[in-house]
Image: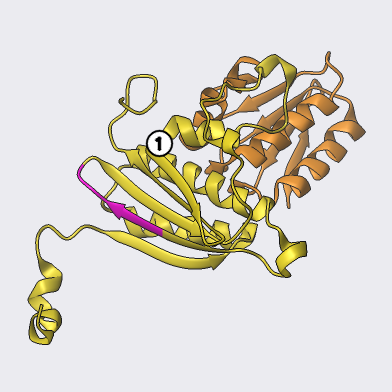
Chain colours: A yellow, B orange
Amino acid sequence: MTPTEQSDPRMQQMPDTQPMFARVLRASPELVRDTLQDIRSRFREDVDEDALGRLELVLAEVMNNVAEHAPSVVIGRLPVIHLCVVRHVGGLACALTDDGSSLPAECLAPRNLPLATDMPEGGFGWYLIQDLTQALCYYREGGRNYLAFSVPFATRMDGRPLS
Amino acid sequence: MQFIVEDADSHLHISVTETRIDAAIATQFKDKLREIVNRNRKPVHLDMARVEFMDSSGLGAMIAVRKGLPENLPLVLLALTPNVERVFRLTRMDSVFDIRAA
């Protein structure tokens, strides 16, 4: 691509341009909240409320996990999250990286819900993430976590993603 | 953190004024609500109509409040919005809470 093409204003109005959101933030619950509200504003006109609600919940769980398990004693500051969300034909593609703690392998293993009658106060986060996403993948490289997944637009009757 | 508390003789009607029960306020939410319900010792109707978003930290806070109440004191959740209802449904916690339309 030549510099002329790059700055051509017509390039920004191509019909197949998809809305996206990108941000770099410190992993604090308050900044996670602000970011989620900004994501909602960004996609409000292009994504239906049901998918937007599922996206918001998944991203809250992922980013709050980074904040909650931050090794702040070791590195002396909050981890930094890089987040990118792009609308595709079938759903919202999400990619996150962070320099927080390594993700325990059991987070990504198939998991069951804690028993409701035991009234557990935690342990729901990764269940919700797995339940609401497709094509979840993770790797760690150079002290960073890389996580990618998709939040589909269409769901089955019970609200879970089509498989 | 504000709750609107009305004493309706047979029960306490508590309206949540926060629009988000998330990791940023879950602990505060739990502590304040437990203080109110423990002081009054009455069945509680919690009006959630204004809550637009709740994550698993918020759910954990709700469960802690329920556990802090004696088992014979009902905690009824009223007017859940779709995003809040989804969290209860997907975690099957809708089976242990008394959830009503309004």
The quarter of the picture where residue B93 lies is: top right
Query: In the displayed image of the protein, which residue is found farthest to the front?
Result: A142
Q: Which residue is mark 1?
A: A133
Residue visible at 15% across and 72% down in the picture = A12
Residue visible at 77% across and 41% down in the picture = B30
Residues shaded magenta: A84-89
* Chain letter behind tag 1: A
Task: Judge left or right: residue A146 versus residue B30.
Answer: left
Residue A92 shows in the view = yes
Question: Is residue A85 rendered magenta in the image?
Answer: yes
Q: Amino acid at mark 1?
A: Thr
Q: Nearer the viewer, residue A75 or B35?
A: A75
Q: Nearer the viewer, residue B51 or A106?
A: A106
Q: Main secondary structure of the magenta part?
A: strand
Query: In the displayed image of the protein, which residue is found farthest to the right?
Result: B39
In what element is the residue under mark 1?
Answer: loop
Residue visible at 14% across and 80% down in the picture = A6
Residue B14 shows in the view = no
Query: In the displayed image of the protein, which residue is found farthest to the bottom?
Result: A4
Q: Nearer the viewer, residue A41 or A57?
A: A57
Q: Position of residue B102 (x, y in %)?
A: 56, 26
Q: Position of residue A54 (x, y in %)?
A: 42, 39
Q: Position of residue A29 (x, y in %)?
A: 63, 57
Residue visible at 75% across and 64% down in the picture = A74
Task: Judge left or right: residue A12 versus residue A162.
Answer: left
Q: Nearer the viewer, residue A88 or A104?
A: A104
Q: Is residue A10 above or below residue A58?
A: below
Question: Is residue B85 rendered magenta in the image?
Answer: no
Q: Position of residue A36 (x, y in %)?
A: 48, 55
- Are there few (<14), some (14-19), or many (20+) residues within 10 Å of tag 1? many
